[in-house]
Image: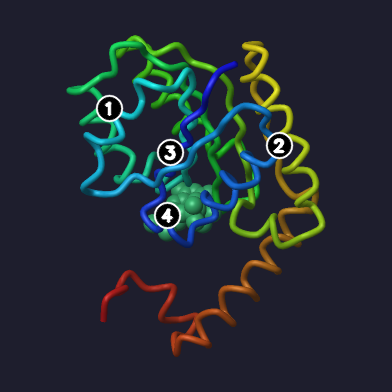
């Protein structure tokens, strides 16, 4: 039986959607799955901890069509301090936009990293509408794909899955605009302010 280390690469790990996805994954996974958030100060500790695991599951959000800097920085340390026995790397990525295909570039970046650094590459689950889907009845779709992801790691029969909310782009846009406008209002920020580049004034 293998052992999976789930590493959360979200910059807001303690209250991240990625954390929720990791929790849901560990509930459907029959293997021992341990969780850790990547922080600025724990890179070396995580590199050492990896020696005990057959599998590494990166759980992270898409940021600007790429990996969040939290994860990039960890990958740099891992490059310099690789474990002796390299785990199989799998990916559980979520993005804000409806289309899970938005995640493809980030997955390719990780695949290239694994190829260049000698890590076997495993499975991928790409989630679209990742900010919203867990709060809807479509949460059940995520659970079923997470089960497939877990089973693929357990069997060593790797695959790729994607999941999103089965609604139209128009409906998604309408619902998400309403959500963000009310979120902004709660924090004293208008739609016009949110549409500018002046995020810190
Ligand atoms: C700085 C930033 C950049 C983002 N860039 C993208 C993006 O390029 N495409 C996308 O679909 N979602 C993007 N998102 C949305 C996140 O992927 C989405 O909210 C995700 O659920 C956040 O996950 P987390 O809570 O685990 O950090 C971005 C969010 C932030 C804060």
- Residue 142 picture location, percent across and down: 72, 43
Q: Secondary structure at mark 2?
A: helix
Q: Secondary structure at mark 3?
A: strand
- Residue 87 picture location, percent across and down: 42, 17
- CB at mark 3 closer than 8 A to ligand 1? no
Q: Earlier in the sequence, mark 1 or mark 3?
A: 3
**Residue at horizontal 29 percent and vertical 49 percent from the top:** 39
Taking 18 as reference, is 25 left or right?
right
Q: Earlier in the sequence, mark 2 or mark 3?
A: 3
- Residue 77 picture location, percent across and down: 21, 31
Q: Earlier in the sequence, mark 2 or mark 4?
A: 4
Q: Is residue 116 above or below residue 16?
A: above
Viewer-nearest of discs 4 and 1 = 1
**Residue at horizontal 49 percent and vertical 21 percent from the top:** 55
Q: Quadrant of residue 126?
A: top right
Q: Earlier in the sequence, mark 3 or mark 4?
A: 3
- CB at mark 4 closer than 8 A to ligand 1? yes
Q: Secondary structure at mark 4?
A: helix
Disc 1: which residue:
48
**Residue at horizontal 68 percent and vertical 29 percent from the top:** 30
**Residue at horizontal 20 percent and vertical 23 percent from the top:** 81
Q: Secondary structure at mark 1?
A: helix
Query: In the drawing, what numbered circle is on residue 7?
Result: 3
- C-alpha span from label 2 to label 1: 26 Å
Give the position of the C terminus as an image quadrant: bottom left
Viewer-nearest of discs 2 and 4 = 2
Give the position of the N terminus as an image quadrant: top right
Disc 2: which residue:
28
- Residue 67 picture location, percent across and down: 38, 40
Query: In the drawing, what numbered circle is on residue 13?
Result: 4
């Amino acid at each position: 039986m293998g052992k999976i280390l789930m590493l959360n690469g979200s910059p807001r790990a303690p209250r991240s959607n990625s954390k929720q996805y990791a929790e849901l994954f560990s509930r459907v996974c029959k293997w021992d799955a341990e969780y850790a958030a990547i922080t600025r100060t724990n890179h070396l500790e995580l590199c050492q901890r990896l020696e005990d695991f057959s599998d590494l599951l990166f759980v992270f959000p898409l940021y600007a069509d790429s990996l969040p800097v939290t994860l990039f920085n960890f990958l740099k340390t891992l490059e310099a301090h690789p474990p002796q026995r390299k785990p199989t790397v799998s990916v559980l990525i979520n993005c804000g936009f409806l289309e899970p295909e938005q995640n493809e570039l980030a997955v390719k970046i990780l695949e290239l990293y694994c190829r260049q650094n000698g890590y076997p590459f495993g499975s991928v689950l790409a989630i679209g509408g990742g900010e919203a889907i867990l709060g809807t009845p479509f949460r059940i779709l995520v659970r079923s794909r997470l089960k497939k992801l877990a089973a693929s790691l357990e069997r060593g029969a790797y695959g790729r899955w994607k999941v999103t909310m089965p609604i139209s782009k128009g409906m998604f846009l309408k619902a998400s605009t309403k959500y963000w406008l009310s979120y902004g209002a709660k924090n004293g920020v208008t739609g016009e302010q949110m549409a500018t580049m002046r995020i810190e004034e």
